Image (cartoon, rainbow, N blue to C red):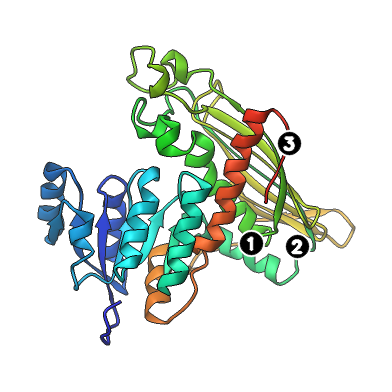
């Protein structure tokens, strides 16, 4: 960050897909200001510049030369996370990178190395960690009120029509790293792992299925069978992950399937209590030895958004909750799911 006294971080956004949400958030966050945008699509860039009233670049390299910019949101396809984040760090910009950290472990490791070398704030946008419900449950964990967390479960399943960008980068494994498990599953696995205390993963047994995408089904508006390279990912994945402390996690995530409605759920189970996020509830032992379930009233609760937290880390020299290094472990778990599915056997996480 530029050496100047300030109470706000000057932000730029690279990539104007999901980046538009980042741009909106930077304009609405108390400790940040939006000063620049970047996108290779000149039409998209022009529209956004006019909307936000800020300058724009078609080259992220040029943006990173802008001394007014303190930090960047990297909101580009997964395979571009590493090169752009590393370039920004090497040019003195703090980085908030969209999930997942990267599309491969080697790329993620390079990002962690660059972050350490730079000494700058490098954070992944793991939005579920920064919700009232997650922070409440995490506080119970830290206070020991849930006891030993030994099991976690999470699911997110879409109906047919849920495959994003059929034929685009989302459905091409070399560009995305995988299908729904790395696209949406990353959020659910990440917050579940965090709520379990971030134990060290050791073994994974996974399975993947591609039953609809290869047939041109499951994507809204898709009317033909895709070429093999247009859909090279799964449309559903499931896995059990084991940890060094004896705990385990069961996860499944799908873009398309025959379910009555969208399915979403997350649960942590401990020796003294448990909790769910969707729907939000806390379970504990009652005086008569049974399970007492409550829904804590979070009305009026305030949790810093991931955007405020990122800027706060820059302004006050803090370590982000979802740092590159922390989220590299999440990426390793996700990649192990695919490795196990391909090998049709359990694999170790090194």
Classed neighbour count for the residue bearing mark 3: other residues with Cα under 10 Å, few (<14), some (14–19), many (≥20)? some
SS state under label 2: loop
Observer-side mark, 2 or 3, equals 3
On the image, the x and y values in percent for residue 307 come to 38, 64
> Quadrant of residue 173 in the image?
top left
Res. 335 mark: none
User: If the image is split into quadrants, where does the N terminus sit?
Assistant: bottom left
Q: Is residue 313 left or right of residue 196?
A: left
* Most distant residue in the bottom direction: 5
> Of label 2 and label 3, which has the lower sequence position?
2
Q: Is residue 151 visible?
A: yes
The reply to whether residue 305 is visible in this rendering is no
- Between the residue at mark 1 and the residue at mark 2, the CA separation in whole angstroms equals 9 Å
Residue drawn at (20%, 57%), measured in percent from left and top?
A: 37
Q: Position of residue 254 (x, y in %)?
A: 54, 31
Tag 3 and tag 1, C-beta contact below 8 Å: no
Badge 2: how crowded within 10 Å, few (<14), some, or many (20+)? many
Residue at the extreme right: 288
Q: CA distance from mark 2 to mark 3?
A: 30 Å
Q: CA distance from mark 3 to mark 1?
A: 31 Å
Name the residue at 70% across, 59% down: 199
**Residue located 83% across and 60% down the image:** 286
List the residue tagged with mark 3.
346
Which of discs 3 and 1 lies nearer the camera? The answer is 3
Q: Which residue is mark 1?
A: 137
């Amino acid at each position: 960050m530029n050496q100047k006294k300030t109470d706000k971080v000057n932000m730029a956004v690279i990539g104007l897909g999901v980046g538009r949400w980042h741009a909106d958030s930077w304009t609405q966050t108390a400790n940040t200001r939006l000063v620049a945008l970047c996108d290779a699509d000149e039409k998209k860039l022009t529209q956004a510049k006019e909307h936000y009233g800020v300058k724009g670049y078609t080259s992220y390299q040029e943006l990173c030369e802008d001394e007014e910019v303190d930090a960047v949101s990297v909101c580009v396809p997964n395979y571009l996370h590493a090169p752009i984040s590393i370039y920004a760090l090497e040019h003195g910009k703090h980085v908030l990178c969209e999930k997942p950290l990267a599309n491969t472990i080697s790329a993620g490791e390079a990002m962690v190395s660059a972050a350490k070398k730079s000494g700058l704030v490098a954070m992944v946008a793991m939005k579920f960690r920064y919700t009232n419900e997650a922070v409440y449950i995490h506080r119970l964990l830290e206070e020991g009120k849930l006891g030993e967390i030994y099991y976690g479960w999470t699911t997110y399943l879409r109906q047919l029509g849920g495959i994003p960008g059929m034929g685009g980068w989302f459905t091409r494994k070399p560009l995305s790293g995988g299908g729904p498990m790395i696209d949406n599953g990353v959020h659910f696995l990440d917050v579940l792992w965090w709520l379990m205390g971030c134990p060290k993963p050791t073994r994974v047994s996974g399975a993947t299925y591609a039953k609809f995408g290869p047939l041109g089904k499951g994507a809204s508006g898709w009317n033909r069978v895709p070429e093999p390279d247009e859909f090279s990912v799964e449309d559903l994945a499931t896995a059990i992950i084991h940890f060094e402390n004896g705990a385990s996690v069961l996860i499944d995530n799908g873009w398309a399937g025959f379910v009555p409605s969208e399915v979403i759920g997350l649960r942590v189970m401990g020796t003294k209590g448990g909790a769910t996020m969707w729907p939000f509830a806390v379970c504990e032992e009652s005086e008569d030895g049974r399970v007492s379930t409550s829904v804590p009233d979070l009305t009026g609760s305030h949790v810093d958004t991931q955007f405020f937290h990122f800027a706060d880390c820059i302004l006050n020299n803090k370590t982000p909750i979802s740092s590159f290094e922390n989220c590299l472990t999440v990426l390793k778990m996700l990649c192990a799911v695919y490795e196990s599915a391909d090998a049709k056997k359990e694999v170790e996480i090194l």
